[in-house]
Amino acid sequence: MDSAYLIEIGSLLLRWLHLIVGIAWIGSSFYFVWLDNTLKAPSDPDLIAKGVGGELWAVHGGGFYNPQKYLVAPKNLPDDLHWFKWESYSTWITGFFLLGVLYYSQAATYMVDPAKAALTPGQAIGVGLATLAGGWLVYDGLCRLLMKRSLLLFAALYFIFVVAVAYALTHLLSGRAAFLHVGAMIATTMSGNVFFWIIPGQKTTVAAMQRGEVPDAIHGQRAKQRSVHNNYLTLPVLFCMISNHYAFTYNHPQAWLVLAAIMLAAVLIRHFFNLKHKGIFAWQYPLTGGAILLAVFVWLAPAPLAVSAASAPQLADIEPIIAARCAGCHATAPTLMPAAPAGVLLDNPAAIRANGPRILAQAVQLKAMPLGNITAMTDAERAKLAAWVAGGYR
């Protein structure tokens, strides 16, 4: 089979699997943070004697549930103990392979932007991998240094670090690759928390109990701390995952600032829900987050075109541009893609006219197409397309 078609198959299957396991991880993370925030101190003396620090009664799917959380650990270790780890590991593994299939195997198209930096595909991949590893090392170092001193200082410094990475990547890689790697860096940090801190802490607790010792509560406290971090980082990661569909965000000249603002809004909104689970309705957080998002969208709104119909180019004038810059992908038999993206064809006059609004949005306003500007469309050609559209697609 054709290699491009095999990449499409790999992308489909990995994206599907990544979504499935990601839902499992995020769902369990959200549930346990909600559970911790809604547990009530037990009134039953037997539960208190057993070391239960909180419990909750819930009904779901026709059944009643009574989850309980111990202050440190139960006196006797149960035989059947579920570990929440593979949800995280499988999400990271599938995400990394998906990154490899979509971006690293096609780095020249999806990662390199000659207008930003003269990188080879290998160098671009190196930047991406260094971002994943370096992001974890900086985060973990800040945690070790500051978490016992100032949570606010830690949060501020880590946010500044993420914004600095976004600034650097948007000046080195293509916009979509930059946004995705910021998200992948944060996701790697989240999975690193599970692999290096949460699960080892739980294993240490279990091992102490198996030896007949009273486990040290510090291991659970550290694991909980990192779990809460993961909860706040989830919404920014999810935005980065879907950002490649919205070129108006990553193609902006100050894309790093766009990403910083959206991530800040996401964290504020997540904080509202975490407080709400505790019965605290702090509406200032979602209002501020929503205001930030609204301000970003107003800022990014494309300027209206002002071209008179009398001076606008004709279809015959722009057909050579479409043929040279767009038809390599958007054709019945494309040469640069296994199939026309989104089924959009631009290889005949009727199809070009019908897709005039798409051409305006993708090639002119967002400059998202050609992908990675692989066919080197010039600004003069984009301006000519804009004039044609403003003239009424004649």
Image: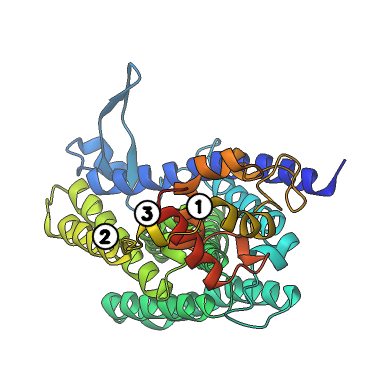
368 or 39: nearer the eye?
368
Is label 1 in a helix, a strand or a loop?
helix
How many residues crowd around disc 3 within 10 Å: few (fewer than 14), some, or many (20 or more)? some
How many residues crowd around disc 2 within 10 Å: few (fewer than 14), some, or many (20 or more)? some
Mark 3–mark 1 distance (CA, rounded to whole Å) = 60 Å
**Which residue corresponds to mark 2?**
293
**Which residue corresponds to mark 3?**
72
Residue 357: where, in percent of width, then height? 44, 48
Q: For this view, does 105 lie left or right of residue 93?
A: right
Q: Amino acid at mark 3?
A: Val
The residue at the point 28 percent across, 64 percent down is: 296
| Residue at the farthest front position | 310
Q: Amino acid at mark 2?
A: Leu
Given this view, does label 1 or label 2 mark the residue nearer the observer? Answer: 1
In the rendered image, the vertical position of residue 259 relative to residue 5, given as above or below: below
Residue 374: where, in percent of width, then height? 67, 65
Q: Amino acid at mark 1?
A: Ile
In the rendered image, the vertical position of residue 270 relative to residue 57, given as above or below: below
How many residues crowd around disc 1 within 10 Å: few (fewer than 14), some, or many (20 or more)? many
In the rendered image, the vertical position of residue 356 relative to residue 64, given as above or below: below
255 or 227: nearer the eye?
255
Given this view, does label 2 or label 3 mark the residue nearer the observer? Answer: 2
| Residue at the farthest right position | 1
Mark 1–mark 2 distance (CA, rounded to whole Å) = 26 Å
Mark 2–mark 3 distance (CA, rounded to whole Å) = 41 Å
**Which residue corresponds to mark 1?**
359
In the rendered image, the vertical position of residue 197 relative to residue 357, given as above or below: below
Q: Earlier in the sequence, mark 1 or mark 2?
A: 2
Residue 359: where, in percent of width, then height? 50, 52
